[in-house]
């Protein structure tokens, strides 16, 4: 009897959480841009108060590192990245030197320490195989914007022994990076990489597409990975 009662309690709580989550959403696709550009709009503009409940943080606790109202003006061109994005099994990887495979991946973009001298987003990515969920690839780094411009720079450290510096322009809902410099540990098993093009594109407020083209010592520039993520937080 107690187990049955516990089951019903769990169902009621779960339904309540889902209902709350369904009500906690932005109803205007411009909410993120508005709140990022001026956090005071959440308290001064009635339409934004009603339409941007999630971005304003009215119905969900948003940790400071994901809080759009705290984005420095320098980082506003890339503020749309902020959050956690995930694809369970939608990634495709191809290259002449490897068998084709699918993968899942989660990436996170978060505000760095507000007391840091350099304003940047912290970036982490973790990819796994869809059959056994073993780690396939991970990388971490920082993304910043040259003040007064839309010029974006990213540094990454990867678990395969590569370190990259990538730069490129940010446009409305997209960034296109090109490799500027690369380092590689002497005993890495991967082929030396000569060039990279990395593109992130916002398809809608909750969907982002990523594509990576690569040129190696033995093969010219061509698509290496492609994936579409869904935003899972906030």
Image: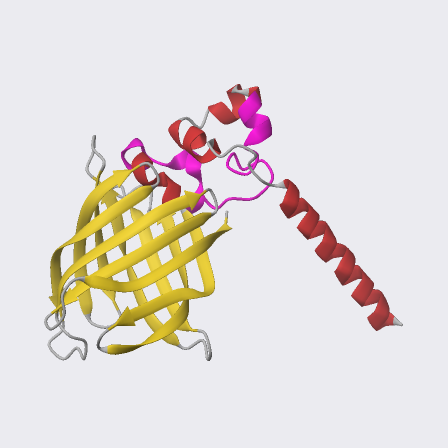
The residue under the point 79% across, 60% down is 9
Scheme of colours in the image: secondary structure
Picture coordinates of residue 137, whole percent (x, y): 32, 70
Name the quadrant containing residue 59.
Answer: top right
Q: Does the magenta stretch include residue 154?
A: no
Q: Which of 212 and 121 is in front in this view?
A: 212
Q: In this view of the protein, can residue 111 be seen by the observer? A: no
Please indicate whether residue 32 sits to the left or right of residue 120 in the image: right
Name the quadrant containing residue 69.
Answer: top left
Picture coordinates of residue 46, whole percent (x, y): 57, 21
Please indicate whether residue 36 sits to the left or right of residue 29 in the image: left
The residue under the point 13% across, 61% down is 182
Q: Is residue 58 magenta?
A: yes
Picture coordinates of residue 187, whole percent (x, y): 14, 80
Q: In this view of the protein, can residue 168 be seen by the observer? A: yes
Q: Which of 38 and 176 is in front in this view?
A: 176
User: Bounds of the magenta span?
Assistant: 47-75
The residue under the point 17% across, 52% down is 178
- Which image quarter holds the N terminus? bottom right
């Amino acid at each position: 009897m107690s187990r049955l009662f516990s089951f019903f309690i769990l169902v009621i709580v779960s339904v309540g959480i889902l209902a709350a989550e369904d009500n906690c959403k932005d109803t205007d696709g411009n909410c993120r841009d508005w709140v990022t550009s001026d956090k005071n709009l959440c308290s001064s503009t009635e339409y934004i108060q009603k339409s941007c409940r999630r971005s304003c943080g009215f119905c969900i606790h948003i940790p400071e590192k994901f809080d759009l109202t705290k984005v420095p003006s320098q980082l506003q061109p890339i503020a749309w990245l902020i959050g956690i994005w995930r694809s369970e099994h939608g990634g495709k990887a191809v290259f002449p030197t490897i068998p084709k495979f699918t993968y899942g991946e989660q990436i996170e973009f978060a505000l760095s320490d507000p007391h840091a001298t350099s304003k940047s987003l912290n970036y982490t990515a973790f990819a796994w195989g869809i059959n056994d969920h073993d780690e396939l690839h991970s990388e971490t780094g920082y993304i910043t914007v040259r003040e007064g411009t839309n010029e974006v720079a990213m540094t990454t450290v990867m678990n395969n022994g590569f370190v990259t510096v990538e730069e490129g322009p940010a446009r409305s809902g997209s960034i296109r990076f090109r490799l500027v410099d690369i380092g590689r540990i002497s005993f890495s098993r991967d082929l030396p990489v000569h060039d990279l093009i990395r593109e992130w594109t916002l398809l809608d407020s909750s969907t982002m597409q990523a594509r990576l083209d690569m040129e190696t010592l033995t093969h010219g520039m061509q698509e290496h990975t492609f994936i579409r993520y869904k935003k899972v937080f906030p």
